[in-house]
Amino acid sequence: MGDANSINFHCSNCGRKISAPKARSGERLKCPLCKQAVVVPVQDTKIEDKHSTDELTFLNISELEEIRKRQAAEMDYLQEARNQEKDQEPEEAEPEEQRRFPWFIDIFLYPFSLPGLKHLALFTGFPLLVFVFGMITPIQFSCFFNFVIFMVSITIFLYMYWYLAECIRDSADGWVRAPEGVGSLPDFTDMIMQAVNIIGCLLFFLLPAGIYIFYVREINFIAWLLIIPALFFYPIGLLSVVLYDSVSGLNPKTLIHSVYSTFWSYVGLVLLFIVMFFLILVYRETQIGLLWKIVFRSIMIYLTFILAHLTGRFYLQNKDKLKWDL
């Protein structure tokens, strides 16, 4: 049995049973469960007068009719609002950017957004700035200059790996141009973790070959038998640790299943990584002047942006087969 001074009713939105004082009859309240506006119903009982419980005056009847009209209007309003919400259910967001040219041409335009060009200038122009300032810095300040350059170089190095991870994640979401980065800098810890994920992933796969080469002091047939599987599994491992944002992405069972389920398209991605790997070796071993090194470095970073984009697109195109629980 409820309190004689309260009105018990059900929320018209979620069905929750609600109790309200009779004094709130006809007023709007919030449902304690779904927080939607509800109107306290007016009971069809005689309205008590100060002087008599049986007598209805003309004023009482007018007030009662007004309350009933207001209640009906409120219920119609709420029903209409609910119908509009059902008709306007949010759909899955589509990327705002679309490819302007066929994909095999448009992928080479990936860095050609304003943020992408800024990052190309930052990552390729920094060595030139270091060289110029090193030439004009007095020898008395050389120690201080070298310390500052070292700290700035470390920061840019870590930021570059963070930005490459952002390119992969952004492309995996369907974007076709390089994302923002400068202006919304991550904290130092986040940059370190991204660098650890990317470099640590490479070391994870190359560790057996590295240990063997260090022991025998040469790269022989057995060494290549260890290097080739590492290069083969590195792209899927890199994609996994970046999207999972954790080294837990290096689960062997997940990686093997992912390669098996996307084998032919994955082989294409592996070939791109192998080409980049050998270009890096050529860059490291070639003895050229500073200007040509800057040009070659610019080309390498440009191709790295494209490779990061294609890695993210690989996930976008194969996520139904990969079935990763991100």
Image: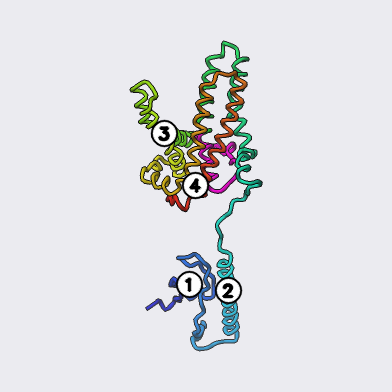
Q: Which residue is mark 3?
A: 228
| Residue 74 marker | 2
Q: Tell me the distance, in whole angstroms, between the alpha carbons under discs 2 and 3.
A: 71 Å
Q: Is residue 199 magenta?
A: no
Q: How busy is the neighbourhood of tag 2: few (under 14 within 10 Å), some, or many (20 plus)? A: some
First in sequence: mark 2 vs mark 4: 2
Left or right of 177, for residue 213: left
Farthest residue toward the bottom?
A: 54
First in sequence: mark 2 vs mark 3: 2
Q: Is residue 185 magenta?
A: yes
Q: Nearer the viewer, residue 72 or 6?
A: 72
Q: Which residue is mark 4?
A: 315
First in sequence: mark 3 vs mark 1: 1
Q: Which residue is mark 1?
A: 11
Location of residue 210 in the rendering, given as x and y in whole percent from the top left corner: 38, 27
Q: How busy is the neighbourhood of tag 4: few (under 14 within 10 Å), some, or many (20 plus)? A: many
